[in-house]
Amino acid sequence: MKMTGIIVEIRKDRAIVRTDDNKLIAIKKSDDMVVGKIISFDEGDVYKEERKVYRYAPSSKRMEKSSRASKIKGFSRVSNIKGFSRVNNIKNFSRISGSKESSEKSSQESKVVDFSRVVDFSRVSNSKKSEIKNFSRISGIKNFSRIASVAAAFVLIFLFGRNVMLNNGSRSEYAYVSVDINPSIEFAVNSKHKVIGTSAINQDALELLESLNVEEKDLKSAMVTVLEKAKSLGYISDDDTNYVLVSMALNDKNKNTEAKRDEKLDELKENIEQGMEEAGNDTIIHKTVTVSFEEREKALENDMSMGRYYLYLEAKEKGIDVTIDEVKSAKLSELIVKIEDDSEPVPTPSITPTPLKSPEPSPTPVPTPSPSETAPTNSPVASKSPDSGPELGAKEIAALGESVVLITAYDENKKVISQGSGFSVGAGLFATNYHLVKDGVVIKITANDGKVYDVDGIVKYDKTRDLAIIKATVDTGVKPLKIGSKTSLVKGGKIVAIGKSTGLKNTVSEGKINGLKIEGFADAIDLTASISKESSGGPVFDMKGNVVAVATYGVSKQGVNAAIPADYVADWVKELAKYSFNNIKIVRKTLVFDSDFELNFAVYKIIKALENEDVTAYFECMTDELYKDETKENLEVLFATFDLAYNVESLKVISKSDEQAKVSYVYTINKESGPNFKNYRITGECSLVKVGGTWKINDSTEKKEYI
């Protein structure tokens, strides 16, 4: 009987194949076998008759094995299979050993008692059967409901969790990323973009992957490691142009909507682009492309990478005469030149500034006031149809540049972690790229006149579109810009992009609209104007002085300058114009380097540890008495099941002395993906003590509300 599977490991005289029903079988090795290749075989190809075959068991059964012990060295337990989570490390689940006593004990353990409310966790008891009674907090901090609203989910997890974990939980193959240099390798990554497996697609890749351990690394770090190894082996040269083709495909086991699929691909692409940027090699020209899951399978059937198969399909579409074998064996640079560079590049036009008469002033907007206060008088007009008028001249461009600011994000050690541009959209409000501010513990705004302002936090953000509005701690007085609309744009229309350099000089880039859509983006504009790291987050103007887009650097494909339509910012500005500066609500708080920073950061970092799914960092934030080992297991299951956003809305030091302090806080927990989950807000107050010179949380009281 013929069986089909994919090669997951090559040994001296055998290959390990994972079959369609998730069995691992050792078969006799042949010269044409490589990791990642899909092959067919029958019983005569099996390496030895006596073998152990592992497969996923239903949640009600333990792992099963064949009658005789395996002769495959290193495959005696499921935990030894590279890329599979360790089943035997999951507490309170039946182990592989399979004794009757163990099985009976497992069925009685993980007993969940009195789960009446979503928030109600208390500490995990130390009873012999580890019964969980009346949870009101995951962490065991008194009245501090760390991930409070997931109790209901834990009922499901503890009753049915084995099935989840036996199917690899968070380690499941979420997407595939191929990197073609001349060696062709493929990463399998999980939903957190961490590498859980590598495959060599061709012979050169075997040398590249030898002694190279990138598993458990995030994708961008893995790409940097691979590029460095490729350079050391001579596949990348400092004396020549080097082409790198990156291709990505989602694992389509779970059917996503088109919008959700685009969002996931955009996030993956951003991680890839960051890896290429961190590699810091100016000789590399790279391109990132998207292929379907079906196209990936076709590529593997033909013993080639997703990227080379993409080039083959593109060649066929363009009518270029090339065969599969030629694409497999040709040098990557030759393929790129033959298939991709078969047309003249679009030249960047040179625009001569034209003097402009002062246009008639626009009418002062009358925003809707809040119930208690009058709205700010300098909020910009969100215009869907900008009035016609003369084109921008040098004087007008300089005037618009006064509203463009420098955005700088810092970590807790005052180290700069990102820097780019932004622009004023209201009293103390500035639009920018989300990727510039998302990891900032402290963010500062430097205005055109050199004044530096602290940021209170993020008011609005959209991760998918890479947009955010941040609020300064005070009204800066920087004049807001008028927001236009994508509907006024046409292909070939002139635009001007303005950014702010670290020296506070405006960087002005003139060009045209190259296209109103970019492949792989949910909504983006393709520009001929150059977008640099410094100008990322800055405004893109039409020739009437309206902001029509926000420049975005680091998430577009090679050779494309992307900008996100300003319509999304316009909608936010309209909403925020209803409120006075002091009444605008922060959704994600940032800190200030002041006398209270150390105390505020002690609370801030414990919530960020949850955001980053870092169990170790989470427990380092509290005193030893406040948690138990069982709580760690709960968190690990939670992280494997949900993708949650934790946003600190406010932090305030109530009292402090040399060794003790109190801090009040508000934060929200929102589901981004995973099973059913009810979003909520936590308001609390915690006491802190100094342990070895570091502030740690010792106790807290909290209340929650669903949102």
Image: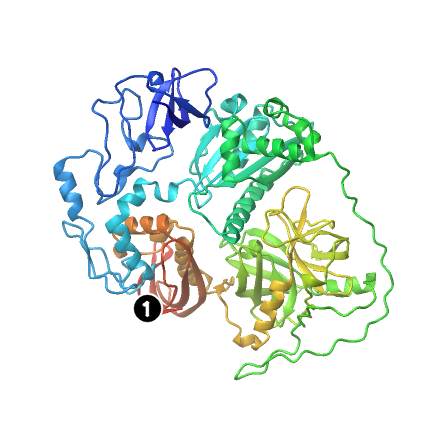
Is the residue 63 above or below the residue 478 in the image? above
Q: Position of residue 265 (x, y in %)?
A: 53, 46
Answer yes or no: is residue 138 visible. no
Count of labels in the image: 1
Quadrant of res 450: bottom right
Q: Position of residue 262 (x, y in %)?
A: 54, 50
Q: Secondary structure at mark 1?
A: strand
Q: Residue at x 27, y 44 (%)?
A: 162
Quarter that holds the C terminus:
bottom left
Q: Residue furthest front?
A: 1
Q: Is residue 306 left or right of residue 598?
A: right
Q: Is residue 374 left or right of residue 140?
A: right
Q: Residue at x 32, y 49 (%)?
A: 637
Residue type (three-letter) at the residue carrying disc 1: Glu
Quadrant of res 56: top left
Q: Position of residue 226 (x, y in %)?
A: 53, 32
Q: Which residue is mark 1?
A: 702
Q: Residue at x 46, y 62 (%)?
A: 597
Is the residue 180 above or below the residue 606 in the image? above
Q: Position of residue 399 (x, y in %)?
A: 77, 66
Q: Residue furthest bottom?
A: 372
Disc 1 packing (10 Å; few <14; some 14–19; many ≥20):
some
Depth check, front residue: 450 or 409: 409
The chosen color scheme is rainbow
Depth check, front residue: 96 or 121: 96
Depth check, front residue: 501 or 256: 256
Answer yes or no: is residue 634 visible. yes
Q: Is residue 263 left or right of residue 340?
A: left
